[in-house]
Structures are given as structure tokens and as C-alpha cells.
Amino acid sequence: MSETVFLDDLKTLAGELLEKEKKFLLDEKEEYAAAVVVVVTPERRYWEEAEFNDVEEKVAAYADIVRHAKENGAVAIITVNSSYVKPVTGSNELAAYRWGDLRESGSQHAITVTISGPGIESCCMNLPYSFEDGAVVLGEPTEFEPALIDLTPDWP
């Protein structure tokens, strides 16, 4: 299977996961506290949850997931997170980012889906949303675009 076809298959799966999370958001009208992670191996795919409340817990949760993924010969990891997003205007802005900065600055809520793995170009997409008068208002999803996915130092 070529890298392009494989990445297209991963994007299709990621889109299906986004739809499930979107349905949850619309039904429950609240953000979730855990990230959903789908690990893809040559033989199968499995999911894990990453629960965290701060950056240290996030690093530890993803380190465990990546360790398990590598032990199972993973070829890709797809993550689905509730996040805050804003355009980055330069590398200095990205380097200065600290956990919670976007939430505290009132940045846009989004469901963020990432794809990363050995030998594939990491990418992400976002589905912006807001809460207005007890209802969820969805924005327009972005297309998948190249992204720096920093799950752990030893995962591409």
C-alpha cells in the first residue's frame, strides 16, 4: 500500500472519529475530559483514553500510549481531543506557548484530530465550536493540514 493511499485511509478513519465526537458534543452539550486515541498496527487497531488535567499528566498519558503503540508495532496514532485553537503567526509565538494559555485568552474551542506515525506526514484538522444559550454551535471544519504533532519525543 502506498503512503498516499494509507494516509487517505487514515484520514477517512479520523473523519469517522470526528463525527462520533461531534455527535457526543451535540448530544451531551459539554466538553469531555479525556482524549480518544486510536492506535493502528499492521494487524489491527485499538483505542485508548488519555485522561489528564495538566501538562505533566498529559505527557505521562501520551508516553504510556506511545510505549504501548511501539510495543505493538504501530504504524500510526490518531488522536481526538477537545482543544483551544488559534492561528500561530510565527515560531516565537509557538515557542512561548504554555499549557492553558489559549483557554485563558478565550481562544476558540475545537475538536482537534491528529494523525502521526513513522513514515507519514503528520497532520491535523479542527472542528471549531462554541456554546451559546445552552446550545452547541458548530463552525466549519478545517481540511487536514501538515502539523507538528508532539505526542512524545520518541514518536514521529
Image (cartoon, rainbow, N blue to C red):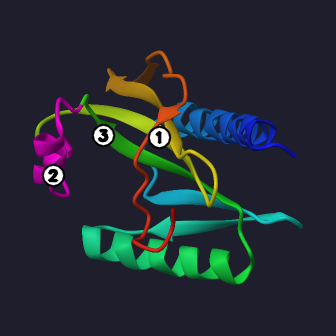
Disc 3 residue type?
Tyr
Q: How far apart are marks 3 and 2 (CA)?
A: 17 Å
For marks 3 and 2 on the same chain, the one whose residue lies earlier in the sequence: 3
Q: What element carries label 3?
A: strand
Q: Do callouts 3 and 2 mark residues in contact (Cβ within 8 Å)?
A: no
Q: Where is residue 122 in the image (x, y as percent from the top left)?
A: 53, 46
Q: Mark 3 points at which residue?
A: 84
| Residue at far top of view | 140
Is residue 136 shown above or below 42?
Answer: above
Q: Is residue 44 left or right of residue 27?
A: right
Graded by Cα atoms within 10 Å as few (under 14), some (14 to 19) or many (20 or more), the crowding at tag 1 reads many
Is residue 71 shown above or below 86?
Answer: below
For marks 2 and 1 on the same chain, the one whose residue lies earlier in the sequence: 2
User: Residue sitting at 62 percent across and 61 percent down?
Assistant: 118
Based on the picture, tell me whether residue 86 belongs to the magenta stretch.
Answer: no
Q: Disc 3 or disc 2, which is closer to the eye?
A: 2
User: Residue sitting at 52 percent across and 40 percent down?
Assistant: 123
Q: Name the residue under label 2.
A: 95
Is residue 134 visible to the viewer in this orientation of the structure? Answer: no
Q: Where is residue 39 in the image (x, y as percent from the top left)?
A: 69, 63
Is residue 141 shown above or below 16?
Answer: above
Q: Mark 1 points at which residue?
A: 112
Q: Position of residue 29 (x, y in %)?
A: 47, 35
Q: Disc 2 or disc 1, which is closer to the eye?
A: 2
Per the rendered image, the range of residues in magenta is 88-104
